[in-house]
Image (spheres, helix red, strand yellow):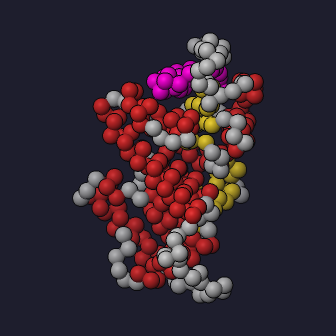
Amino acid sequence: MNAYTNELCSDSYSSPAPVLIAGDSDLALHHAARTVEAAGSRIGAIVPLDEAAERIALQASASAVWVELTRDGGPAMDRLLHQLSGDTADGRYTAVVAAPREMVDLLFSRIGGAPVELVIDGDEAERAAALAIATSGIYRADRLSDIASDRSTERLRQLSDEVSRIASTLARLSNGPSQTQRREPAPPGAEVPPVSADTVRSVIRARRLRSRFFEEELFADPAWDMLLDLLQAEIAQLRVPVSSLCIAAAVPATTALRWLKTMTDKGIFLRRADPHDGRRVFVELSPSASQGMRRYFAEVGRAAVI
């Protein structure tokens, strides 16, 4: 990898903290650098994957670390992801990891619980949005407007809406329902109504059928789609890997992972390590979420649950 060095840019100390870039090939480094530069951020250093962990440890300050992956990088990648997970959890910096779809399970097993932005097969708009989220904590379309092409403008707006929806969901989950809406929880040991797998499957089929007549984006509701998929798997006694759950969400994988992390952080979903593969995790409903879904189906009865 001779195309890039790890020299720091010589910008003024008054400039925003730089973004450190690491990647597993010259092409990956170039792609990451193009994204960071287009977003108007300052590049602090560009290093190959096997030097990244040591270089990050020496970095005095950074607004974010961007890691560009194209394949499983083995021990060097694992070491770097472990470091990112710990450092971001400690608030030392924020991070973005961009990778292809086939790495979803591996990445989630390594950093699924950390405050790291994952970009899976992301277009330029998704990549720019992820960097904005990582460096500012909120999505600010005005910062990205000058790098968005006409084709990307609508996607940027959608990404802004998606991040806003997730933030709103987090706020509602944190605050809980209002007193007027609160219902008494089921008493301990209360019988959980049975739900057939066929019932849940029919709802999922009906939801997917809508895309034959309307644009699927009109009905995007990844949280509900994932709840349905996990309930169906629970009834059928099947395990659901992260990659499958992202497909069930019926939204881009990057968006699905944001929702998945939100639901996991709030205890609605649970992570289970694959006992046969340390580089993969399964996702399942928490006991309370399972009861909630089953009671919901029992209460709506034969009505269409779409």
Q: Is residue 70 left or right of residue 247?
A: right
Could you tell me if residue 21 is visible in this image? no
Could you tell me if residue 141 is visible in this image? yes
Relative vertical location of residue 190 with respect to residue 165 in this rendering, above or below = below
Foreground pick, 56 / 210: 56
Residue 294 part of the magenta-drawn span: no
Relative vertical location of residue 59 with respect to residue 295 in this rendering, above or below = above
Which quarter of the figure is the N terminus placed in? top right
Name of the residue lying farthest toward the left:
213
Q: Is residue 92 left or right of residue 72?
A: right
Q: Position of residue 37 (x, y in %)?
A: 50, 22
> Which stretch is magenta?
23-50
Q: Residue drawn 35% across and 61% down?
A: 208
Q: Residue drawn 62% across and 72% down?
A: 287
Q: Residue drawn 51% across and 35% down?
A: 132
Foreground pick, 255 / 237: 255
Q: Position of residue 236 (x, y in %)?
A: 54, 72
Foreground pick, 205 / 287: 287
Which quarter of the figure is the C terminus placed in? bottom left
Q: Position of residue 7 (x, y in %)?
A: 66, 14
Quadrant of residue 242 in the image?
A: bottom right
Relative vertical location of residue 165 with respect to residue 84 in this rendering, above or below = below
Quadrant of residue 218 in the image?
A: bottom left
Q: Residue drawn 66% across and 84% down?
A: 188
Give the number of callouts: 0
Q: Position of residue 111 (x, y in %)?
A: 65, 45
Foreground pick, 274 / 206: 206
Residue 46 part of the magenta-drawn span: yes
